[in-house]
Amino acid sequence: MRLKSEIWVHALLRRCAVQGLNGAVLHRGAEEAGAVYVVINHLNGTHHLLVPPPGPAYDAEGERQFELAFPELRAWPPLSDYIAKLRKSDPDIWVVEIEDRDGMAGLKPRR
């Protein structure tokens, strides 16, 4: 059984808080099965965007999968525009921002 998106997002934020990372929901999506997008704010003006991969959202061990939307770091204004387009095409998505200067908030994007 898969966790509802809302529960998964709140668990991610709780785990990040325990690690000393700040996080917030930028856009609340569908409680049950909204796709989750994670913005990693590196606190230096650059960001990564983790998106659901094509195909299954979970791996064989039941962990939610992500991939990088862009291989390079992005500034906020163009990334914000990209997210706005995603939200326009699918208003049920969740957008979460995690501030992590040195990493990916414990998430491992697949290659």
Image: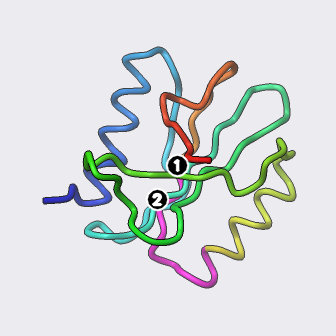
Asked if the stretch drawn in magenta spans residue 92, the answer is yes
Q: Residues within 10 Å of mark 2 (few under 14, many from 20)?
A: many
**Real-space Cα separation, disc 1 to disc 2, in angstroms:** 8 Å
Judge by depth and name the residue closer to the eye, 77 or 72: 72
Q: Quadrant of residue 42?
A: top right
Describe residue 14's horizontal placement relative to residue 20 as left or right. Answer: left
* Residue 92 to residue 2: above or below: below
Question: What's the mark number on residue 71?
Answer: none
Residue 47: horizontal and vertical position, in percent?
75, 40
Residue positioned 30% across, 48% down in the render: 8
Q: Residues within 10 Å of mark 1 (few under 14, many from 20)?
A: many
Under mark 2, the amino acid is: Val
Residue 110: horizontal and vertical position, in percent?
55, 47
Residue positioned 86% across, 59% down in the render: 78
Residue positioned 31% across, 70% down in the render: 33
Describe residue 80's horizontal placement relative to residue 9 as left or right. Answer: right
> Mark 2 and mark 1 in contact (Cβ < 8 Å)?
yes
Q: Quadrant of residue 28?
A: bottom left
Which of the marked residues, 1 or 2, is nearer the chain's N terminus? 2
Region of the chain picked out in magenta, as a range: 87-95
* Residue 2 to residue 46: above or below: below
Residue 57: horizontal and vertical position, in percent?
39, 62
Q: Which residue is mark 2?
A: 36
Q: Does dot 2 land on a helix, a strand or a loop? A: strand
Question: What's the mark number on residue 96?
Answer: 1
* Residue 56 to residue 74: above or below: below
Under mark 1, the amino acid is: Val
